Image (cartoon, coloured by chain):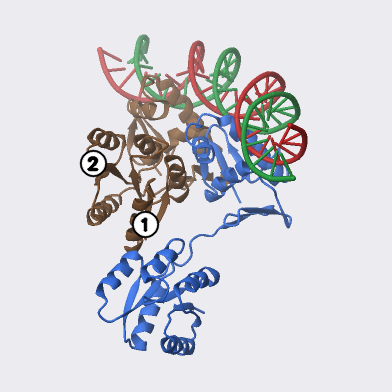
Chain colours: A blue, B brown, C green, D red
Amino acid sequence: MTRVLVIDDEVPILRALKINLAARKYEVSTAADGASGLAAMARERPDVLILDLGLPDMDGTDVIRGVRGWSSTPIIVLSAWGQESQKVAALDAGADDYVTKPFGMDELLARLRAAVRRAVPAPDEPVISTAEFTVDLARKRVTRAGADVRLTPTEWQLLEVLARNAERLVTQRQLLQEVWGPGYQNEAHYLRVYMASLRRKLEPDPSAPRYLLTEPGMGYRFCP
Amino acid sequence: MTRVLVIDDEVPILRALKINLAARKYEVSTAADGASGLAAMARERPDVLILDLGLPDMDGTDVIRGVRGWSSTPIIVLSAWGQESQKVAALDAGADDYVTKPFGMDELLARLRAAVRRAVPAPDEPVISTAEFTVDLARKRVTRAGADVRLTPTEWQLLEVLARNAERLVTQRQLLQEVWGPGYQNEAHYLRVYMASLRRKLEPDPSAPRYLLTEPGMGYRFCP
DNA sequence: TGCCCCCGCCAAGGTTGCGTGAAGACTGGA
DNA sequence: TCCAGTCTTCACGCAACCTTGGCGGGGGCA
């Protein structure tokens, strides 16, 4: 079910939207000002945001920027008739679409459907599993046999690069550059130490790696 | 959706770009210095890179070289007015285009579109198959009868050059140059040793090659 | 036919790269 | 200030790889 957040301070509009959207099987939540709207945005992670530009506490474009700082959720703006400049500013700030008040419910619903359709489906699959352990990239967590595995920062970074390039051969230069930064591209020694450490923590038999494989002379490969 | 990475240490510019590009349906990520920029580059594999030359930690041209070492992603450089020599150095290092600050957003967007448009030819067909074995250039992997074939670094480089020029005749000089570097152009002996090794690992009958063919007096040819 | 160049094959020696253990340097928190 | 965890550095044994040399065969050319 598609979840919609409506940020608007006019009670009649809020109620009308709530009733109409709920009737179309949208899950609706509401906020009456910019501050609580941003909070609701972060808390509820809706699929679409409907935002009235005429809020009592904040400029509408600031709300948009506040959202766009961390989310690409589609934003549909409601603006009073005649406020052209505000409209442009809203689009420049990152809004996806706008509707002029007074608006017909059909038009709003059409734009809503379009916005949802355009939305990017899924960012990434941030979880990579093997028969032995699981790597959760988003939570920065490794689980083995149900228990968390404690990794040092360096170990984690190394594993992360390998996991993001699963199945692919990652060059020693690339690993060194991404984990230690440029200027360390010849310190292949570090890799050996930390690969050994990762293997001790993750491999069933660290001396005969099954997942963290060495490609002699070239680099390493993570095979889930 | 086109993904853009912006590397810049000036927060206002970063924010302006982020907002404007996001409004144009670009997916924007940012980094504030060269080191984290290079890391982001490798991690996120954007379609275009926008790079400010005035970074706090690294010379801009070094960032460009760091990227060009493994990627052909288009690079658009931002430079302050009057720094002509820097600009030239950046282009020499492998940048594709430059914009002088202060710049109009329209100009930047136009150059961005142009860079993306030009970038198309890159994506090779990274997998080459024969009836006997398969070469996956992206993963640096050779499979034969379902099992991985272990190649030494030199063997792999040789096969890679031949595979990228499949069906074409590759001269001995060219092979020697690309695998061993300049200065080895007369060491044809190396080729014989390593072609023999490749044939042993890949050909059904190494003494009667079907895929890795010799063109006497000229060079070798890989026929899938 | 005989010579010669080019190619394929084998084997040995030297070098490089990898895994491992451990000791010192460093950092952040108590 | 001390302490624990972490990072860096080093030395060693071992295996794999690269280089080099030599030998034999086959095809082109006189």
Residue B96 percent across, percent down from the top left: 27, 43
Along the line of sight, the residue nearer the viewer: D16 or D26: D16
Are the residues under badges 2 and 1 in a single subunit? yes
Residue A186 percent across, percent down from the top left: 51, 29
Q: Give me the chain letter of mark 2.
A: B
Structural crowding at the residue carrying mark 1, measured as other residues with C-alpha within 10 Å and reported as few (<14), some (14–19) or many (≥20): many
How far apart are the alpha carbons under marks 2 and 1?
22 Å
Circle nearer the viewer, 2 or 1: 2
Mark 2 and mark 1 lie on one chain; the one further toward the N terminus is 1
Give the side of residue A24 with respect to residue B119, left or right: right
Q: Residue at x 47, y 79 (%)?
A: A32
* Above or below for A85 versus D25: below
Structural crowding at the residue carrying mark 2, measured as other residues with C-alpha within 10 Å and reported as few (<14), some (14–19) or many (≥20): few
Q: Give me the chain letter of mark 1.
A: B
Mark 2 residue type: Trp
Mark 1 residue type: Lys
User: Helix, strand, or loop for circle 1?
Assistant: helix
**Residues under numbered marks 2 and 1 in contact, where contact means CB atoms less than 8 Å apart:** no
Judging by the rendered image, the residue that carries numbered circle 1 is B18
Q: Residue at x 37, y 49 (%)?
A: B6
Residue B98 location, quadrant? top left
Along the line of sight, the residue nearer the viewer: B159 or A106: A106
Residue A123 percent across, percent down from the top left: 48, 61
Residue A73 location, quadrant? bottom left
* Above or below for A11 versus B206: below
Give the side of residue A220 with respect to residue B76, left or right: right
On the question of residue B203 being in view, the answer is no
User: Helix, strand, or loop for circle 2?
Assistant: loop
On residue B81, the disc is: 2
